[in-house]
Amino acid sequence: MATVVKRARSEPVKAPLWARNWAAFGTKAPKASLGDILVFERAGGGGHVGIYVGEDTSAYHVLGGNQGDAVSIVRVAKARCLAVRRCPWRLAQPSNVRPIKLAAGGALSVNEA
């Protein structure tokens, strides 16, 4: 996530390898929308961070690295979401930043490692 943010010429969070630190990135979003940063809890106190690409009734569809040792899109239960953060846009926010409704499909991810 730090690489994506750096290439977008935005400031990453301090200690970006700790997923829960991303809860301080950008601004709090009123609801998850295309391109937002989502921060999730993991069992045992860890965390995971990824980019919102859509959602179904019970899960966010999240683009992230190190999800099954790959860059992929996985379904993560909404109940695990700790924070929804919006990028600090340098120009105008793109018009397609909105919630994206998708059909549920595939298993829920429980540990993105």
Image (cartoon, rainbow, N blue to C red):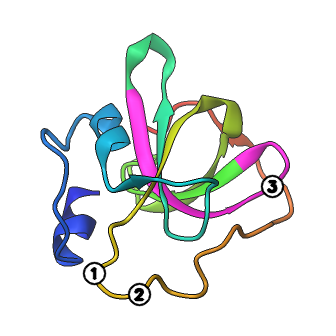
Dot 1 or dot 3, earlier in sequence: 3
Residue 92 is marked as 2
Which quarter of the rendering shows the C terminus? top left
| Tag shown at residue 32 | none
Q: Which residue is pictured at 16% across the width and 69% down the height?
A: 6
Does dot 3 land on a helix, a strand or a loop?
loop
Lower sequence index among marks 3 and 2: 3
Q: Nearer the viewer, residue 93 or 80?
A: 93
**On the rendered image, what quadrant is the N terminus found in?**
bottom left
Query: Between marks 3 and 2, how big is the CA–CA gap?
Result: 28 Å
Part of the protein shown in magenta:
47-59
Asked if the residue under mark 1 is in contact with the one under mark 2, i.e. CB atoms within 8 Å, the reply is no
The answer to whether 15 is drawn above or below residue 84 in the figure is above
In the rendered view, tell whether residue 57 sits above or below residue 41: below
> Which residue is at the front of the view, 96 or 90?
90
Give yes or no for residue 2 being in the magenta stretch. Answer: no
Residue 18 drawn above or below residue 12: above
Q: The disc labelled 1 sits on which kind of residue?
A: Arg
Image position, residue 49 (x, y; %): 41, 45
Q: Position of residue 106 (x, y in %)?
A: 77, 51
Viewer-side label of 3, 2: 2
| Residue 21 drawn at (x, y percent) | 28, 36
Crowding at dot 1, Cα within 10 Å, few <14 / some 14-19 / many 20+, comes out as: few
Marks 2/1: CA distance? 7 Å
Q: From what the image shows, is residue 47 above or below residue 103?
A: above
Q: Which residue is mark 3?
A: 56
Which residue is rendered at x = 17% and y = 76% of the image? 9
